[in-house]
Amino acid sequence: MRYLIYVIGMVFCMIYGISLHKICNFIDAISFGFVVVPSILALITTGYWKDFLKAFVYIFNKGRETKERVRESAKAVKLVCISSLIFGGLGVTISLINALHGLNLKASHVGADISVALISIFYALMINAILLPLYFELKRRDTKNSK
């Protein structure tokens, strides 16, 4: 219930801060894919994809998980958090280099280029804002089970 209240509050703040008529300014499928696809590939190649999905189940089903399962789910969530930040930062770097490269040619489009460049780190931070409470709840349960 705590986690659900947190997510609803975050969505409310986003909608209130962004407003619905400007939400399209925050949608860029290429930047989103640049952050999310490597995270999904990291989950698949390491074999943590099942543990990542089970992390959401463990939040709602208390007492049915073992210590090892909780620990593996926490590792999977941490993997997604770290990989999204790495690729979000990489996306910003690549986009800013491209924006600065074309600075002399189109000086009037600098604001739009920089906003597009920063959107990938926005996606990475949003992923972390959603997953970090889940990670810390799993870590709390792991330490609680080990005592």
Image (spheres, rainbow, N blue to C red):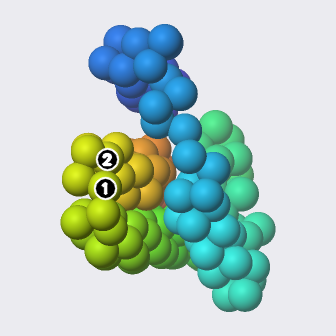
Left or right, 21 with respect to 50, comes to left
Residue bearing the label numbered 1: 106
Taking 54 as reference, is 38 above or below it?
below
8 or 114: nearer the eye?
114
Label drawn at residue 109: 2
**Circle 1: residue type:** Lys
The answer to whether mark 1 and mark 2 are in CB contact below 8 A is yes
At horizontal 44% and vertical 19% (from top left) the residue drawn is: 22
Q: Amino acid at mark 2?
A: His
> Crowding near pointer 1: few (<14 within 10 Å), some, many (20+)?
few
As helix, strand or loop, the secondary structure at mark 1 comes to loop
Instruction: Work out whether residue 1 or residue 16 is closer to the camera in this orientation and state it.
Output: 16
Quadrant holding the C terminus: bottom left
**Does residue 43 appear to the left or right of 103 in the view shown?**
right
Q: Is residue 94 above or below residue 142?
A: below
Which residue, as the protein is rendered here, is positioned at the far front?
A: 105
**What x and y, as percent, mark residue 135?**
44, 57
Q: Residue 140's image quarter?
A: bottom left
Residue drawn at (57%, 55%), measured in percent from left and top? Answer: 32
In terms of secondary structure, where does tag 2 sit?
helix
